[in-house]
Amino acid sequence: WRNIGPFRGGRSAAVTGVKGKPTLFYMGSTGGGVWRTTNGGSTWENISDAYFGGSIGAVAVSESDNNVIYVGGGEVTVRGNVSAGNGVWKSVDAGDSWTHVGLSHSKHIPRIRIHPTDPEIVYAAVLGDLYQSSNEKGVFRSKNGGKSWEKILFVNADAGAVDLTFDPTNPRIMYASTWNVRRTPYSLSSGG
């Protein structure tokens, strides 16, 4: 292993490659927005600063249209200095420009999944507010590219969704993980 950067942007738990493009990667950092490399990590460029920045929890590129990218704000690495985000951002031109597409009060979105054949169908795992109970937690779905969202899985006001994946043989089947986690200025409660 070798460190290929970028050397600005903080820790990261959000990175994705692009099918069929072995040197193209996108990385979301906890304090530096979204970064792109087109040469396998030799150089990186920030592609979100003109639109948004801050903490990124999820980056997803559509398999059926690589120009469509969704980004979820708010890191999943629950630490004493965890940073929240401000919802979902979408690009339809491979990261050259961005539009905010909702879930503004979600705080932490650790995973986004895009339907493999329809980039307008997108799912967001929302961990929600880490400091208090909230109904803005669970799995949300948009069927219109983020114009509107519906909550399709809600466990309770203390447990948010932390991961999502499609069954690799059938995108009508989805698996979700939830996490009951609470951060305070002086403690961390995790489990359930």
Image (tube, rainbow, N blue to C red):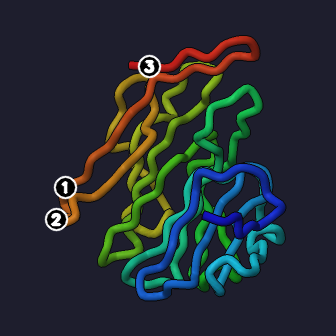
Q: Secondary structure at mark 1?
A: strand
Residue 111 placement (x, y as % from top left): 48, 51
Q: Is residue 158 left or right of residue 192?
A: right
Up-down: is 188 above or below 146? above
Residue 72 placement (x, y as % from top left): 58, 55
The front one of 66 and 4 is 4
Residue that sits furthest to the top in the current view: 186
The front one of 55 and 97 is 55
Q: Is residue 165 left or right of residue 79?
A: left
Q: Amino acid at mark 3?
A: Gly
How many neighbours does mark 1 have within 10 angstroms: few (below 14), some (14-19), or many (20 or more)?
A: few
How many neighbours does mark 2 have within 10 angstroms: few (below 14), some (14-19), or many (20 or more)?
A: few
Between the residue at mark 2 and the residue at mark 1, the CA separation in whole angstroms equals 6 Å
- Residue displayed at 50% across by 63% down: 146
Q: Which residue was labeled with disc 1?
A: 173
Q: Quadrant of residue 3?
A: bottom right
Q: Secondary structure at mark 3?
A: loop
Q: Which mark is residue 67?
A: none
Between the residue at mark 3 and the residue at mark 2, the CA separation in whole angstroms equals 30 Å
The reply to whether the C-beta atoms of the residues labelled 2 and 1 are less than 8 Å apart is: yes
Residue that sits furthest to the front in the current view: 1
Q: Amino acid at mark 2?
A: Asn
Q: Amino acid at mark 1?
A: Ile
Residue that sits furthest to the left in the current view: 169
Up-down: is 94 above or below 178? below
Up-down: is 112 above or below 119? above
Q: Which mark is residue 191?
A: 3
- Residue displayed at 68% across by 30% down: 79
Q: Which residue was labeled with disc 2?
A: 170
